Image (spheres, rainbow, N blue to C red):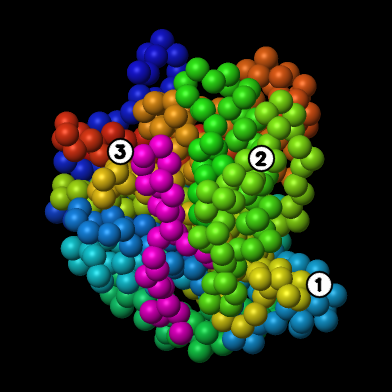
Amino acid sequence: MHDFFRPGRSQAMARDAMIATSHPLATTAGLEILAAGGNAVDAAIAACAVQCVVEPAMTGIGGDCFVLYAPAEGPVRALNGSGRSPAAASAAALRDQGLTEVPRISPHAVSVPGAIGAWTKLHREHGRLPFGRLLERAIDYAATGYPVTERVAQDWAREAPLLAEQPGSRAIFLPDGEAPKAGTRHRQPLLAERLTEIAAGGAEAFYQGETAQRLVAFLKSLGGLHELEDFAAATDGADWVEPISLNYRGVEVLECPPNGQGLAALMILSILQGFDLGPDLPFADRVHLHAEATKLAYHHRDALLCDPAFAAVPVAELLSEATAAILRGRIDRIRARPPVLWDEPEHRDTVYLCAVDNEGNAVSFINSLFHGFGSTLTDPATGILLHSRATSFRLIEGHPNVLAPRKRPLHTIIPGMLRRDGRALGPFGVMGGHYQSAGHAWFVSNLLDRGLDPQAALAEPRTFAFGGKLEVEPTLDEAVLAELARRGHEISLRPTPLGGGQAILIDRAAGVLHGASDHRKDGCALGF
């Protein structure tokens, strides 16, 4: 129960339908679609399209997308809308240039964006309203302007020095030479034109014709290896795949399979399942066990996860109780083990949203540019900002995630879904780059081990065992910090919040939806 004497949010509740996003204009756009007779798929696409305008640091039509769709009846489906590298891409060629990793600000960081292909496939098979209707709010905000919210302004200002180095980005994202401040109005007329084309022509309008020609010419002018054939191949490039899952405390937790890192979230939960994490466990113990399980799971993630079309990922073995027992046995309950150091690029910028409609269909939806403003490369002819997802590839020959032609990189963006007795309990997700797997496990444990409502489960202070340190939010109690340091954790205070999140839980017995939207972002959950 929320303490109304303290700052914070209570959970949202509604009877028929609900949507939760990280931006109020996206939430209201999705709610508008639900009220107009659209379903959860329609609402999610409409909301994400708005976020591609009003949260430009976090997401865009030049990014990637993953979806978990739980129909009211039937199995959960996973849609992989991550793009592939160009056919001419080669780790050896980049190594010959003296590179040891894929540079973020370069055309080599740009795999063919997969988001629009995912939106159109999802809508074609499961949407209800006309596709063009779903983009109307996004087009309007891009053409006539939208107010910059506080968290968006903060994220925008952080990336301003990099945006200033790119002519296309500087012209659009630094009006008057600086990042817009909170409360100012920003427009993207070129993006409005692209969204209008997509509304009328679907994926073909993005991956074929004039827009694709201009994007390829722009990337090639920077030394990129992209060809029109690479973009055309992505028109219907999103793939329906089988979700992976783990039963945690009697609830099935579903994730998208590799190339996403949802496997790491399930591994953390699999390890934690062997401990009593009930409400009476001291908070320092809870953080410590989560940190140690995270180190173990992420070590396997970085060594093994990749595009399964290029190398087998031993999902069943990694999620087996035998593996969990071995890893669990490596945890010292009173002492932090030596840290596992990652050399993956840091990335944190993504949007997550979820929706449930009046038929009981549920959508867990995530869309990302990877880094803040992605590659920072904006094509001046189309106004499309391109993501930096290909920086996740490795250039180490023989590594499962090595860069190769028409290959998907390891992905950090992961939608989540809970299911009980064969029916969706609700969609959830936590943004935050590397943190997402750890964040999923933290949220699920807060929900199922501690009995917190979804808003309280999102609001709890966050920690992340990353890069040899234990990153902590400044809201963590001083006594807990002291105890964690005593156990050997090297504490690092976070200058910015650890991600954000949304969730909707379905109480079928009461006929009530419970929604939550993280206070770390500007958004909200709304329903009717």
| Residue picked out by circle 2 | 329
Amino acid type, residue under disc 2 in the picture: Gly
Q: Is residue 512 above or below residue 55?
A: above
Residue 30, horizontal then vertical, whole percent: 28, 49
199 with respect to 314 (left or right): left
Residue at horizontal 32%, vertical 46%?
A: 419
Q: Nearer the viewer, mark 1 or mark 3?
A: 3
Quadrant position of residue 378: bottom right
| Residue picked out by circle 3 | 505
* CA gap, disc 1 and disc 2: 39 Å
| Residue picked out by circle 1 | 99
Residue 262, horizontal then vertical, whole percent: 51, 54
Label 2 SS: loop
Label 1 SS: loop
Quadrant position of residue 115: bottom left
Label whose residue precedes the other's in the sequence (1 or 2): 1
- From the viewer's side, name the closer residue of 117 and 163: 117
* CA gap, disc 1 and disc 3: 46 Å
In the rendered structure, find residue 313 and report the number of the disc placed on it: none
Q: Quadrant of the N terminus?
A: top left
- From the viewer's side, name the closer residue of 72 and 519: 72
507 with respect to 369 (left or right): left
